[in-house]
Structure formats: C-alpha cells, structure tokens
Amino acid sequence: MSTAVAVVLLLAVVAYAIFGGADFGAGFWDLTAGGPEQGAHPRHTIEHSIGPVWEANHVWLIFIFVILWTSFPEAYASITLTLFVPLTIAALGIVLRGASFAFRKAVVQLRHRRLFGALFALASVLVPYCMGAVAGGIASGRVPAGGQAGDPVHSWINPTSILGGIMAVAAAAYLAAVYLVWDARRLSDNEMTEYFRRRAIIAAGVVGVLGVIGIFVLRADASYLFQGLTSRALPLVILGTLCGVAALVLLLRDAPRGARLLAVVAVASVIIGWAVAQWPYILPQTLTFSAAASPTGTLTAVLIVVVLAVLIVGPGFILLYVLDQRGLLPEEGAEETPAV
Amino acid sequence: MTTTLSVLTGMVFVTPVPWARAQMAFTLGFHIILVPLGVSWAFMTLIANYRGLRHNDRSALILAQRWSKFMAVTFAVGAVTGTVLTFEFGLLWPRFMGQWGEAFGVPFGFEGLFFFTEAIFIAIYIFGWRRLRPWTHFWTGVPVVIAGIFGSISVVAANAWMNAPSGFVLDSNGNVVDVDPIQVIFNPSMPWQAAHMLVAAYLVGGFLVASVYAVGMLRGRRDRYHYLGFVIAFTVGAVATPIQLGIGDGLARWVYQNQPVKFAALELLPNTESDAPETLLGHLNDNYTVSGGLPIPGLASWLSDPSTGKNTVVQGLTSVPPDQRPTVRQVNIVHLCWDIMVGLGTALFLLAVWYAVSWIFRRRMPQTKWFLRAAVVAGPAAVLAMEAGWVVTEVGRQPWIVYGHMRVEDAVTANPGVWITFFAVVILYALVGTTTILVLRGMGKRFRATQGFTDQDTPYGPSALTEASIEEPAKAEETVG
C-alpha cells in the first residue's frame, strides 16, 4: 500500500513539474523579455497563455506536502528540518510570485506593472531553483532519517543540488517555451511563434548540456542515484533523451504540435527515472518508503482522497484546460472595461 | 558563503519557540481574513448572479461580475498565503508533523481535494463570464460554494483534532501505530468548531463586503448597484449572526465539559468553585487573584449548565499543575479576546436586529445615516471578533499543541533562524496586505469610472472590443489609468 501512495506522490511531483514548471518557466521568459516596449509583445503572449490556469497549479504542491506529511511523516520532518532555508525561500517566492501576478493583471499604470512584473519574474526563477536544490539534497542522500536535521547548509549547497536547481529552471523554461510556441501559433501570431521557437531550441540545448554535465556530477556526488539511473532506471533515461532529441528535431523543423507532447514526456520520464533510481528509498540509503509509511488507516484515507480527486477534480480540470486551450475563455479583465 | 552563514547562526542563537509561535499566529491571522471571502463571497456572488438572470436585473449582473473579479484577487492571495501555511507546518513544527502527521494530516487530504475543486471552478466561473451560456455559467459557480464549505470544515476538523485528539492508537513508545481516519475527522470537537467557523465565514464575509457598500452609500452613491451590493451582503451577515450566537454558546459548553482549563482561562477563574462569576474585562494577577473588571455573580456557573444553575461547579486554573495550564499572561490574553469576541458578537446581533425590524415593519432597510455608519464599522468589527475567537481557542489550548499529548516546545523546529523568517514574513505580508487593499480599491475606482457596460459590451457573448483590447493593451491602459 505504501507503494501505491508513493506512486501517487510521484505523479503529483510530475504534474507539478509539468504544469507548475510551465508557469515558472513562463516567468523566466518574462524576466528575459527585455524593456517595457521591447518586451510588451512576448509578455502579453505569456500572460494570455498562463492567465486562466495559474491558480490551479499551487494545488499540486499542496498535494505533495499533504501526501508527504500524512503518509511519510518521519521523512517530511527530516526534510523540513534539514532543508529549512531553501524551502523557506521557495515559500516566500511563491507569495511574491502569486501576489504580484494577480496584481500585475489588476493594476493599470505602467510603473506599477513593471514593479510587479519584475517581482513576478524574479520569483519565478527563484522558486524552481530552490525546488530543484531540495530535490538534489534528498536525492544525494543528504537528508538523514529519524526526523532529524542534517547539515543546514551543505544539504542544499552541493553539486547535486546546484545541478538540480539549474536543471529545474532550465527545464521549466524549456517546457514553457514549447507551450508558448503552440499558444502563439494558436493566436496566429507568427512573430511570437518564431520568438519562442528560437528560445525553445536554445533551452533544449541548455537542458541537454546540463544532462551531460549531470552524468559526471551524479557519478561523483550521488552514487546511489547514479547506479540506479544507469541500471533499473536506464530505460526511462533513454526514453527521456530520445523524446528530448525528437522534440528538438521537430522544433528545428517548425512542427511544434508534436514537440509539445514529446517535451512533456521527456521531462516526465526524467523525473520518474529519478524516482525509480532512488527506489526503494524516500531518503536514499537511510529510509525506505515502506519503513517511513504511516499506518494502514491513514494510507487508505489518502488513497480514497486520490480516487475522489480523480472523479471530482479530474473533469473540472479537463474542462478548464480544454476551454483554455481552445481559446474559448477570453482573457480576464477585458469585458467590463471598454477602452473608450 | 558557508562560513558566513555558520558564523551568523552561531552568533544569533535565539530560541525558536516564541518566533515560530508568532510567525504561525501572524500568517494564520492574515490568512483567516481571506478565508471568509473565499467561502462566502462566492455564495453572495451567486445570489446576485441569480437575481440578474432570473429578474433580468442588469445592476445585479454587473455586481456579480465585479464581485467575481474582486474574488479572483482575494482568492489568489488566499491561495498563496494558504500554500505558505502548508510549508510552515513542516518548517516550524516538524516534530509535530513527524509524530502526528499520520493522524493530524488526514483532514488536510480532504481539504486539498476541496481546495482543488474550488480553485478550478473559481477559474472556470471567473473566466467563463462571456463564453458560457448564462445558466451554465451560473451552475459552474455552485461547486465553488460547496467546495468552500467542505474545505473550511476539513481544515477546522484538523484544528479540532488538536483540541480533542482521537482516532489513533499509540504503542509503548508513544508512536502512532494505528489510525482510524473517520474518528480523526469526526473528532468530538469537530462539529462545534466547524459549525462555528463556517458560520463565522458567512458572518464576516457578509459584514465585510457590506461595509464597503455602506461607505459608498454614505458618500452619496445611492444607486441600485450599491443598494444591491449592500443588501445582499448585509443580509447574509445578519442572518448568520443569531445562528452564530447559538453555536458559540454550544461550543463554550463543550469546552466547559472537555477542556476545563481553557474554560477557566476564558472565564478568568483561578479556583474551582460553584456560583462562579462571569467577569467582564478584569485581569489575573501573578498570585492568581482577579482584579478589576465587572463580575456578574453566578453567571458563569449558570451559563455552563443552566439545569443546575448557580450550583454548577466550574473548574479553576489551579486545579491542574502550573506546567499544564496557560501562563498568567496567556490567561489574560485569552480572557480579553473572549470578551472582545462575545462583546462584538452581541453588538453585531443588535445591529442585525435593527436591520430585521426595519424590514419586517417598514419593508425596507433602515434609512438613517447612523445605521450605515454602524454598518461600516460592522465589517472590521466582525473580522476582529473572528480573530479574537481564534486567539481564544489557540492560546487557550496552551501549553499543548496536541491537547494532553504533546507540548508546543516539543513540537517546534530546532532551527535557530526562525526569527529571521518571522521578520521576512511580516514585511512581505505587510506589503501583500497593503497592495491587496490598494488593488481592490483601484479596481473599484476603475469599475466606477467606466460606468458598467456599454451596449456592445454585454456580460455574455463575444465582443468586438475584446480583440481590440488584446491587440493594443497599452493603449487601453493609458485611457483607463
């Protein structure tokens, strides 16, 4: 049963990476879009694309936390005690990001928009970096079992964490750019299609280079993970690489539709590969999922919640996403304020 | 970098308990103001939406649409402050979560589910104004209301569990080895506390929204739009008030029976006695005597159990050892907040009676400016009453985090840096709070400036203007701003 909950946890992490990651990545492109005039057009495309869905994505993170603290409380205590600093920065970053995005939409003066825009974009880079660093700290076995605090500094400032952090930012930017190509195309905006296509290709290159560097970093710094990745998780790593390369080829050939799906599969298979590689440990080599698991009653309740979520939230989420992707839901804020 | 950090950590070793407590209290106290809006505003919006569609009332429809936009802002802020709370459970209270997460966490699983539902349907509702058919769109708002209700019940169930922990089995080392999720959620304190908070959400949301329109009406904006905004919201608050007094009375009796020390703190009662007085205001001294205040003889006993009246024995603070009761300072905080909550609740009740009497006998809301002035105050007063109520239940539980099982100082993080995060959080939240209010005000002004819709710009159906404003957002900004 603890395996089932672990799978749910993994799916939530993947969903957060894919949906939330795209949001954070969009913030990265917002940050790098340049001055107010030069960057107005891409910023508008970004806002249009993430507007309706952005709030839904914190829910994945909340789900991850809730599953962790109900189902694997000991591991959760260890993680929060050890990785206090990056988690705190991430939490503060989420406050800044969420609030400033909402405010940027609500305020009209350019000066205010720029301020909130900058905060939004900065936080969008900071949060995925911290999340990646946290993942790196866990994956490299720097979080001890038993609800104890590990090294408060080296647990997140270490080669694997730095790799994880940069990788998270780059992967988020990559996903976002691929989505944005598709969005711009849907709006028949050729200029933006080209703009984000170029950026998607660059980001794909960066992710690829980081992946190669990662091989060496992990071999030196996270040996258990490296062994896992090169043995039982190898098929997933290969799948991820193939999808990534295929997506790049499609982007170069200007066929973004398939690229979107391939990019998602690539990112998802790398994350699933990470989980398979560190299996059966939730905290590598000190605490297994089954040893950390809560009593059966709690795990049953968690699984019931998951089933209900699929039944209740699933249709709503699909409806929102379909409506959004079809462009049926207009941009917020337009209808009641006639421009004259 | 590393050495600087460790030197800093070494230099400023501060015990984390008071800081963690302060940060949790501050973030919860902030979040809880947004909760009533998330829970009850959707309901009020749907009332306006229903009126607008059923009676073809343009003002009501405009009201519903604008409310949904304001709601989007408060919901967004609430979503992030809520996310911070999920971080804080682990960051500030890791030992609590580590030991009790398997039981305490269960209600949060369901809360997550309802929050998820609420987030999605609120997005569909807000963004669906113009591209869904009117009644279809109306119905997409209903799940928001339902999810809000069950979501807040779930969260309060978790807090109630801290007051009345149940549904688990401990081994000889004190570890949780078996959990019954149903008993965890439906713990003895849950029905009372959940009802009290849910009705509070409608009470506070109603009075808070109404107070904004009361200000508008006092400034001479006596149009149908402001009238509807006031009447819908104030009626929701006014209906909730008497219900809340009844639930509050029941909850107090539950506390009397199950958390006698907390009850002694809120009644300011040092010694166990019958014929216990209800002291209004007053102060507990370090030597456990009460000074000041206005004691009403026998009332506390009588209220605790009317069947035995004045003879009801009420347990005092000194009935348990000092380390199992709140400190004198905490007792004084609890008692003061208790007085504030009950006092403001009673005042709001009288205001609601005024409103109801006017409707019953004159078929209209009270017309005097004094009523509107009172209604302006009612919003902040309701918020204050709710905050005071939370202080009563949280500080009154001290020194326990899990009543009778785990003390707060055993739950806290070992991390000495909490004081830094406390200040960071306070500064950040102060900014967020100020900006939220400014943004909401700005939106209101902008809405007023545009005078609602033009004929081209009806709430439903696509509009030519949308495409134009997408293409030239900057131009639109300049015109509006």
Image: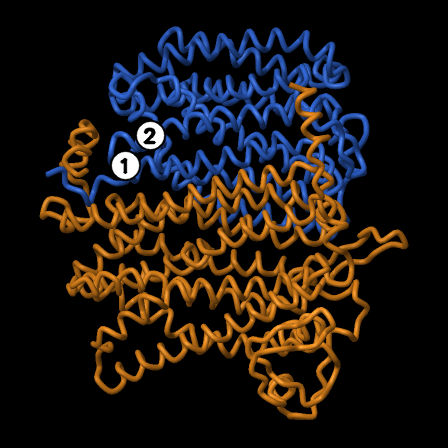
Q: Is residue B345 above or below residue A287?
A: below
Q: In this view, does A257 lie above or below B190?
A: above
Mark 2 and mark 1: Cα distance apart in space: 9 Å
Q: The C terminus of chain A is located in which quarter?
A: top left
Q: Position of residue A115 (x, y in %)?
A: 35, 30
Along the horizontal axis of the image, is B370 left or right of A29?
left
Mark 2 or mark 1, whichever is nearer to me: 2
Along the horizontal axis of the image, is B127 left or right of A321?
left
Q: In terms of depth relative to the viewer, which is nearer, A195 or B253? A: B253
**Crowding near the residue tagged with mark 2, few <14, some 14–19, many ≥20 C-alpha atoms within 10 Å:** some
Q: Where is residue B241 in the image (x, y as percent from the top left)?
A: 43, 74
At x 43% / y 45%, what residue is drawn?
A: B77
Q: Is residue B305 above or below residue B124?
A: below
SS state under label 2 = helix
Q: In the rendered image, which residue does mark 1 sit on?
A: A331
Q: What residue type is labelled 2?
A: Glu
Give the blue chain's letter.
Answer: A
Sooner in the amino-acid sequence: mark 2 or mark 1: 2
Task: Name the colouring of the figure.
Answer: by chain
At x 37% / y 57%, what residue is drawn?
A: B42
Q: Which mark is residue A106?
A: none
Q: In terms of depth relative to the viewer, which is nearer, B135 or A23? A: A23
At x 28% / y 70%, what residue is drawn?
A: B373
Q: Residue A47 carries which label?
A: 2
Q: In terms of depth relative to the viewer, which is nearer, A221 or A9? A: A221
Q: The N terminus of chain A is located in which quarter?
A: top right
For the residues bearing labels 2 and 1, Cβ distance under 8 angstroms: yes
> Which quadrant of the view contains residue B157?
bottom right
Along the horizontal axis of the image, is B194 left or right of B6?
left
